[in-house]
Every structure is written in structure tokens, then in C-alpha cells.
Amino acid sequence: MQNKTWRDDIRAYVPFNEQERNDKARFLEVLDLENILTRENEEAHVSSSAWVMNDALDQVLMAYHNIYQSYSWLGGHADGDPDLFAVALREAKEESGITELTPFSQDILALDILPVPAHIKRGKPVKEHEHLNVTYLFIAPTDQTLTVKADENSAVAWIPIADLPKVVSEARMLPVYEKLIARSRQWKAEALREKGPR
């Protein structure tokens, strides 16, 4: 039997809500395009995010993104790498400086189609496009040294989830983050139920 691929993972993903049902349908429309994992596809390409929370699930690790001028989750382009979990893990470490983080699961936490406005990156214009984004959940201690990745962000911080509306200037991202918090708490509750009384 062949190993599962990232495409298999997306096809098998069970949407969390109506938004994800719509976004999964969009994923499936373009999933088999040869260049969908790379920025060569200027209309849409795959990205992978790490949703990094503390053990209590009441804080999230975010970077202040220079392009969007907002605190944002950690992640980046697949750039041809079909191991989307590894992409999320690598980006989390590169963008925040943390070294100790534990995957809650290697299953996909969320699927989102994220519109990216036209912008300038490293002196070159980038046209408006879509990120076909998958997200994975990680748990990390909050006492680690954080470092800025100066070419992409200007701050990294643990944000109490109650403060997200104050620090996230991209209003369209707040429902995405609220969904990720709800989904993370659902996963933790399910894990505790499965573990049962000691």
C-alpha cells in the first residue's frame, strides 16, 4: 500500500464548519495542478501554518508581520515541499526562534482559503492571489527565548486570546483565529475524554 500524500490528507479532511466546506471545495478544484505547491502558480498556491498555543490554550504565539502590519499566526509557503506538517514546524521555529514545541497531532487542524492582496516583497511586485492554507496545532512552553525574523516580522509575542481583537488589525482573520481556538479546545477535550479517569 502506498504512503498517504498531502493530497490524500486534504481529500480526507472533515470540514469543521460551512466556511471550511466551501474552502475544501476550492482546494479540490485546484489540488491536482502540477505547480500548486509552488509560487510558480501566481493565482493560488499552498501554504502551511502553525497554530502554536500554550498548554492551557489561553495564549497563542504570533509574529508582527511586516507586510500585513498586524500580529499573525506563524507559517509560510510550501515552496514545493509536499510535507506540509514539516513546513509548518520549520516556519514556526524560523519565525519565532522557539526550539521546544510539541505537535498536538500531525492531522490537519484547519483548511482556509486566504486572499492575499497585491504587495511588494523584497523589492518585487506580487500580484493578488490565494493561499490554500493548511494549519497544524502545536503546544509550546511560554518561557522560551523569542527572536525576530527581521526580513518578515518586527516582533514575536505570546498573545492572550482575549487580546486578539486588539492586536490583529486584519479583521478578516479574527474569525479564522476564533475557529482555530474552538477547534484546538475541541481536540483537547476529546483527548481528555479518550484518556478517561486515571
Image (tube, rainbow, N blue to C red):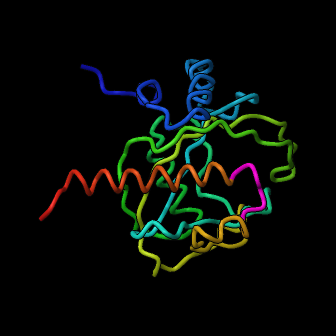
Was residue 104 drawn as part of the magenta stretch in this picture?
no
Q: Position of residue 50 (x, y in %)?
A: 52, 54
Was residue 169 drawn as part of the magenta stretch in this picture?
yes
Question: Where the N terminus falls, by quadrant?
Answer: top left
Q: Give the range drawn in magenta.
A: 168-173
In the image, what residue occupies the spot 15% across and 62% down? 197
In the image, what residue occupies the spot 61% across and 74% down? 157
Q: Is 60 placed above or below 129 here?
A: below
Q: Is 184 placed above or below 162 here?
A: above
Q: Is 85 placed above or below 50 here?
A: above
Q: Where is residue 81 in the image (x, y as percent from the top left)?
A: 51, 38
Q: Is 71 placed above or below 16 here?
A: below
Work out whether residue 190 or residue 117 is closer to the camera in this orientation and state it. 190
Question: Where the C terminus falls, by quadrant?
Answer: bottom left
In the image, what residue occupies the spot 86% across and 49% down? 120
Q: Where is residue 70 in the image (x, y as percent from the top left)?
A: 75, 63
Q: Quadrant of residue 166?
A: bottom right
